[in-house]
Image (cartoon, rainbow, N blue to C red):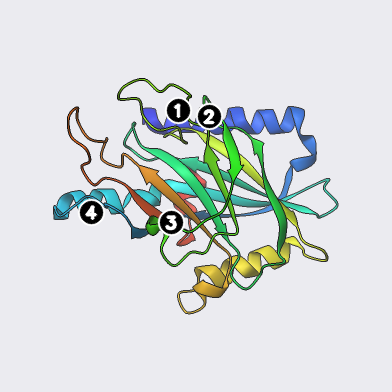
């Protein structure tokens, strides 16, 4: 209940920021999707119960895809939040793979920053945790210049949210984005559609002092429209 209350207050704060200082991005339509498909990574190691927990965490990561009002139909917003029930977990990378729709976007930017960390557009590149994805755009998080010993990696933590904005390519519309998303969500056409992937660390809380890893990291990709996400 506390996590849900924290998440709700965070979402309300973020929406308030958008409403007050970025009125032009008020959504005119939306679809909500979860990241409930594990791709690769430590994934809980060899313990079946830890695998079940770690690899099921994508169900707690959500994205609202909305058309931006006032942008003359030229941009789409991706409101991403985490409700992972492991307080140390961190989403460290968000990747966009446009598949065969290479002209869908002209670029991606950070519209609303998450609390306490700085998100930034980074070079898109393949990653073993996001196997099957060929990212065209990526967002990461600035690391402290001098991290303290044992300090967690920078990233989006539970209860926090952010908004990314994608500028549409020439003649592209919100309907084109939804069509590409549907293609990416269909298992038979996924490779040619629009997909979002995330890399998450500390799915089980991270290793104790003196231990290099407990295999609790992994990559996830969007899985399906999620009423459960919308109710949070």
* Disc 2/disc 4 C-alpha distance (Å): 28 Å
Looking at this view, is 223 or 89 the one in front?
89
Residue named by callout 3: 127
The numbered mark at residue 52 is: 4
In the image, which is nearer the foreground, mark 3 or mark 4?
A: 3
Look at 71% across and 52% down and name the residue there.
107
> Which residue is tagged 1?
6
* Disc 1 from disc 4: Cα separation: 25 Å
Q: Is residue 3 above or below residue 194?
A: above
Circles 1, 2 touching at the beta carbon (< 8 Å): yes
Q: Residue at x 75, y 52 (%)?
A: 75
Observer-side mark, 3 or 1, equals 3
Q: Secondary structure at mark 1?
A: helix
Seen from the viewer's position, the closer of residues 178 and 184 is 184
Q: Residue at x 65, y 64 (%)?
A: 178
* Tag count: 4
Which image quadrant for residue 92?
Answer: top left
Q: Are marks 3 and 1 in contact (CB under 8 Å)?
A: no
Disc 2 packing (10 Å; few <14; some 14–19; many ≥20): some
The residue lying furthest to the bottom in this view is 188
Q: Find residue 25 and report its horizontal and vertical position in percent.
A: 75, 42
Query: Which element type, helix, strand or loop, lies under badge 2?
Result: helix
The image shows residue 170 at horizontal and vertical percentages of 82, 63
Between 227 and 112, the residue placed more toward the observer is 112
Q: Position of residue 128 (x, y in %)?
A: 38, 58
Q: Report which residue position mark 2 lands on.
A: 10
The nearer-to-camera label among 1 and 4 is 4
> What residue do we see at 19% from left, 30% from top?
208
């Amino acid at each position: 209940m506390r996590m849900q209350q924290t998440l709700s207050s965070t979402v309300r704060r973020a929406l308030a920021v958008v409403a007050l200082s970025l009125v032009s991005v008020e959504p005119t339509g939306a679809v909500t999707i979860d990241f409930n498909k594990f791709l690769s990574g430590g994934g809980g190691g060899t313990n079946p119960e830890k695998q079940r927990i770690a690899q099921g965490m994508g169900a707690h990561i959500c994205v609202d895809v909305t058309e931006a009002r006032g942008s003359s139909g030229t941009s789409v917003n991706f409101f991403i939040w985490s409700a992972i029930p492991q307080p140390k977990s961190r989403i460290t990378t968000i990747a966009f793979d446009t598949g065969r729709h290479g002209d869908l976007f002209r670029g991606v930017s950070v519209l609303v920053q998450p609390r306490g960390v700085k998100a930034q557009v980074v070079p898109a590149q393949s990653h073993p945790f996001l196997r099957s994805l060929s990212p065209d755009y990526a967002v990461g998080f600035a690391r402290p210049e001098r991290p303290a010993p044992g300090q967690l990696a920078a990233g989006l933590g539970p209860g926090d949210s952010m908004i990314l904005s994608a500028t549409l390519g020439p003649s592209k519309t919100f309907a084109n984005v939804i069509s590409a998303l549907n293609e990416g969500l269909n298992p038979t056409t996924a490779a040619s559609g629009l997909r979002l992937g995330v890399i998450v660390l500390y799915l089980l809380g991270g290793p104790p002092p003196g231990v290099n890893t407990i295999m609790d990291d992994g990559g996830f990709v969007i899985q399906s429209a999620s009423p459960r996400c919308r109710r949070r």
